[in-house]
Amino acid sequence: MISGLALYLFSTVFICYLTFSLRNNLITPLVWSALFWITILFTAVSTVAKSFIGERKGRDIYYYSIASPQAIIISKIIYNFLLCSALSITGFLLFLLFLGNPVFDIQLFLLVVLLASMGFATSLTLLSGIAARANNSHILMTVLSFPVVISILLLVIKITKNCIDNLDRSVSWDEILTLAAINCLVAAVSYLLFPYIWRS
């Protein structure tokens, strides 16, 4: 799975590179930001959506017999966060290599990448657990994840623009705190609600 996602990530960035190199590298910083977050979003969805949906039947019963539901959801969130973070940082390095670097405040941008990875991991892991209990789980996963993912994307795109414009970090603190609060809230909801989902 990891090799497939890495190939998808590399192919997407390379196609963007070929597309804009044919137009004499006419890529603006805002276009760079949009392409980056679209790539990371689809990579994260492809990764985290399989947390519960892609598992074989019967494995849930095995997990139920050896671990608590809280331990299962926390372990899946941590695993998905580490995987999303690794893929996001790899994507950033590929963007630097092929499409240049319009970001001035790289430290703040990397913090945003980690917070976005945590947001995708917490929200999509819980939604994958909900969708796995229903028929047409892939369609339900798409419908449920849309409002949560959009709220995260709006925040990270705004902070990314501030990093590109080299604004003072204090300008972005409200969005960073909001993003961190969303991550904490979704993680707490996942911890509290997952045992009821797991019982079904």
Image (cartoon, rainbow, N blue to C red):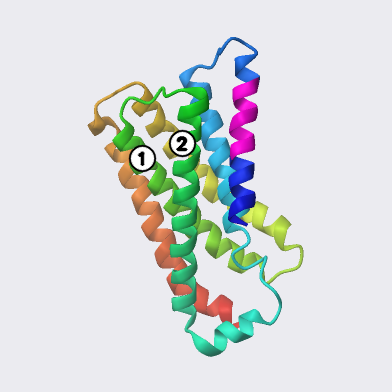
Q: Residues within 10 Å of mark 1 (few under 14, many from 20)?
A: some
Residue 126 badge:
none
Check disc 1 and give the amino acid type. Answer: Leu
**Three-letter amino acid code at disc 2?**
Phe
Separation of marks 2 and 1 at Cα, in angstroms: 9 Å
- Specify whether residue 11 is painted magenta: yes
**For mark 2, what is the residue?**
92
Q: Which of marks 2 and 1 is nearer the N terminus?
A: 2
Q: Give the range drawn in magenta.
A: 10-18
User: At which x and y percent is residue 83?
Assistant: 49, 55
Among the 4 quarters of the image, the one containing residue 187: bottom left
Q: Mark 1 points at which residue?
A: 110
Labels 2 & 1 near each other (Cβ < 8 A): yes
Task: Give x and y (percent) for residue 49.
Answer: 62, 58
Question: Per the image, is 62 magenta?
Answer: no
Residue 26 or 138: which is nearer the viewer? 26
User: What residue is rendered at 31% in x and 36% in y?
Assistant: 108
Q: Nearer the viewer, residue 97 or 62?
A: 97
Q: Main secondary structure of the magenta part?
A: helix
As drawn, 113 above or below 19: below
